[in-house]
Amino acid sequence: MRIVMAALAALTLSAPAAAATVLGFERVNAAYPSGSAQILNFYDGGLSGAGTTGTNFGISFSANAVAVCLNSTTITCSNASTGGLVPTSSKGAMGLGSSGVAIMDFSTAYTGAVGFRYAIVSGVAFIKAYDGVGGTGTQLANLPLFANASGCAAYAATLCTFGPGGLGFLTNARSLVFGGIAGGVVWDDITLGAGNDPLPPPALSVPEPAGWMLMLAGLGLVGAVMRSRRASPLRAESQSQ
């Protein structure tokens, strides 16, 4: 039985892991370094305020959501930087064009986990989830966010570094509302499907055809062993008569 369970476990682990969707805002601005282009329909098969387009995830943003240029050790284009600690998104993040809120809409209802990284110098920001577009309908989640950035002198950034956060698991969400003070909060690596830390888990590799054949042969051998074990008591009884 242990052999069977081990074989089944091997087959299960060999299945590909579901990939998380990560919005890193890296190419919303037309170039790096850059200004702060509106994100708009960059992730919805359309254009950003800079005329760029990205992968169509069926996600759009209101006009107040802008792509913030992040500082490196040699380039200063804002007051924000990952400080070299977030490898998935080092050049772009999401901020607010003016104090207030920015809305992220799903073209179809989203069910799953929502994670992100963020930096706040002072004050309070928030993320809320709703079952209607445009931040309408029933509120599904409300997460206040507090100051967590200590600054990175080497990157000339006060909004640095980014800490992890998450809304947990949502059911049938149609919009996320991001609120705070312009220039006082940035979000990055908004991740759908990977829990509270938006860095997605490594994908499990898919076995090569030869690997599948070996596993199938192994299962056949397991079956033969089990049949042999079931037959053994009968042979023993026959010999004793």
Image: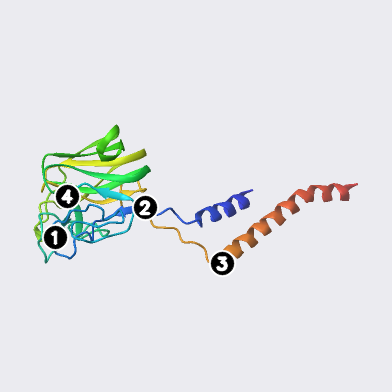
Between discs 3 and 1, the one toward the N terminus: 1
Q: Which mark is residue 71?
A: 1
Amino acid type indicated by mark 3? Pro
* Relative height, residue 92 to residue 131 (above, below): below
Amino acid type indicated by mark 4? Gly
Alpha-carbon distance for marks 2 and 1?
A: 26 Å
* Relative height, residue 237 to residue 130 (above, below): below
Q: Which mark is residue 95?
A: 4
> Dot 1, crowdedness within 10 Å: few (<14), some or many (≥20)?
many
Q: Which residue is mark 2?
A: 20
In the image: residue 92, left or right of residue 195:
left
> Is label 1 in a helix, a strand or a loop?
loop
Between discs 2 and 1, the one toward the N terminus: 2
Amino acid type indicated by mark 1? Asn
Q: Nearer the viewer, mark 4 or mark 2?
A: 4
Can residue 196 be seen in the rendering of this structure? no
> Is label 2 in a helix, a strand or a loop?
loop
In the image: residue 159, left or right of residue 128:
left
> Dot 4, crowdedness within 10 Å: few (<14), some or many (≥20)?
many
Between discs 4 and 1, the one toward the N terminus: 1
Between discs 4 and 2, the one toward the N terminus: 2
Between discs 3 and 4, the one toward the N terminus: 4
Q: Which residue is mark 3?
A: 209
Alpha-carbon distance for marks 3 and 4?
A: 46 Å
> In this orientation, which residue lies closer to the viewer: 200 or 45?
45
